[in-house]
Amino acid sequence: MPHQPLATVLAAAADTTGFHPGPAFFAFWALIIGAIIGVPVYVVRLMRNRRNRR
């Protein structure tokens, strides 16, 4: 059994006996969607703060 969390989540998400997503599958996609939404928001706020300091 791998000790890397991402590998464990991917192994749980890639079930070969049929598609029955468990909590790990939803947690994995929640992290991906959160990163897709959160990173641009963080970058925009960082740029605005830097611009306002000048």
Image: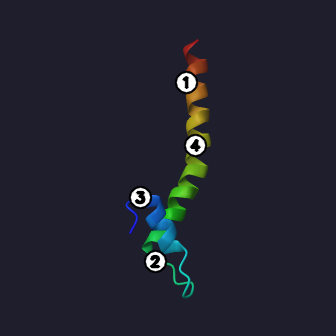
Callout 2 amino acid: Gly
Q: Which residue is mark 2?
A: 22
Q: Secondary structure at mark 4?
A: helix
- Viewer-nearest of labels 2 and 1? 2
- The residue that mark 1 highlights is 49
Residue matched to label 4: 39
Task: Give how far apart the Cα atoms at labels 4 and 1 are.
Answer: 15 Å
Of label 3 and label 4, which has the lower sequence position? 3
Q: Secondary structure at mark 1?
A: helix
Foreground: 53 or 1? 1
Secondary-structure class at tag 3: loop
Q: Nearer the viewer, residue 36 or 8?
A: 8
Instruction: Calculate the distance from the C-alpha at mark 2 to the C-alpha at mark 1.
Output: 40 Å
Q: Amino acid at mark 4?
A: Val
Q: CA distance from mark 3 to mark 4?
A: 23 Å
Q: Read off the residue under disc 3.
A: 4
Given this view, does label 2 or label 4 mark the residue nearer the observer?
2
Between 17 and 28, the residue placed more toward the observer is 17
Task: Locate residue 14: give its quadrant.
Answer: bottom right
Which residue is farthest bottom? 17
Circle on res. 40: none
